[in-house]
Amino acid sequence: MRTDALTKQYGPVTALAGLSMSVPRGEIFGFLGPNGAGKTTAVKLLLGLARPTSGEARVLGAAPSDLEMRRRIGYLPELFRYQDWLTAREVLALHCALAGLPRVRWSGAIDASLEIAGLTARRDDRVGTYSKGMQQRLGLAVALVAEPDVVFLDEPTSALDPVGRRDVREVLRSLKARGATVFLNSHMLSEVEQVCDRVAVVDRGRVVSLGTLAELLGGSRRVRIGVEASTAALAAAAAAFGIVERAGSTEIVIGGVEPGRIPDVVAALVAAGARIRSVAPESQTLEDRFLALLQEPDDADSDHR
């Protein structure tokens, strides 16, 4: 899967601004960004649900408009609703038909996807009797029923309890094990950390960072520095090395500091009049790095706001 300078405009609004990235087969790829970053637009373009203003997208080597390629895709949207009067088996049978699956394979495919989603015991119950978490599981079963080569999942664990989230993680790992590609769009960054091979962070329609979790997190640290009587001058000195997350009377917390610059941070604070009581580097979480990236200045900001 790849995109080259993919752009989508809705009148004067640029929803996606030259998105370029590639996702190899068999990878679990996290696609992250704040609301309005262009994530949903990108997914719609990759699925062929919208046409780009410019640029190109390829999924499984074909254009998103290719119907044969679409049959090899599974999709769980963030907002979905199935007919309350249908049973889970009937919902899945409908999607087997939509996917063009041969009738002889329906029964086995339905049973397998119900088992994966943990709904076998409720397969003949009407959807209207399902809890929100069970409907989320049914949505996952629908996405997987045709054994797709590429699976797009938009917030797949949003309505699930911890057991359900663990089950989804296992499903994603099993998809990867059989060579499927998973495109995961989620705000639950702790979940992304546990399953994704690589992550792209998108803001205002552009990729602002892309790489493995080690690459995203390994180049910077949060540093807690104990000081006496923090001042505005100390906060200004600290800001030259990262994002000042806290500048209290006894502690300054700086995010996004390169490990080799920590001695320079201390020296700059001493030069600004600080008395240092302690220095405690901390490893960043994905959430830390995500927030830091969104606060970094964007040279093209005026072009697409």
Image: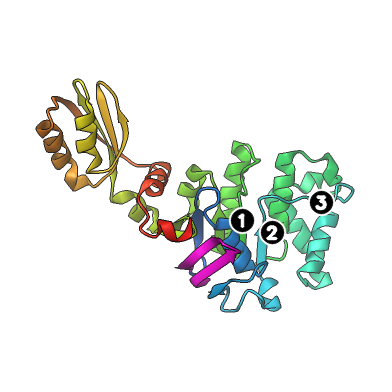
State the image coordinates of residue 78 (x, y, percent, origin top left). 66, 50
Q: Nearer the viewer, mark 1 or mark 2?
A: 1
Residue 221 image-quadrant placement: top left
In three-dimensional space, the C-alpha distance between marks 3 and 1, rounded to whole angstroms, equals 19 Å
Based on the picture, tell me whether residue 145 belongs to the magenta stretch.
no
As displayed, is residue 137 above or below residue 176?
above
Q: Is residue 76 visible?
A: yes
Based on the picture, tell me whether residue 3 belongs to the magenta stretch.
yes
The tally of labels here is 3
Q: Earlier in the sequence, mark 3 or mark 1?
A: 3
Circle number at residue 143? 2
The residue indicated by pointer 1 is 153
* Residue span colored magenta: 1-23
Tell me which residue sits at (56%, 49%) in the image: 169
CB within 8 Å, label 1 to label 2: yes
In three-dimensional space, the C-alpha distance between marks 3 and 2, rounded to whole angstroms, equals 13 Å
User: Foreground residue, 8 or 141?
Assistant: 8
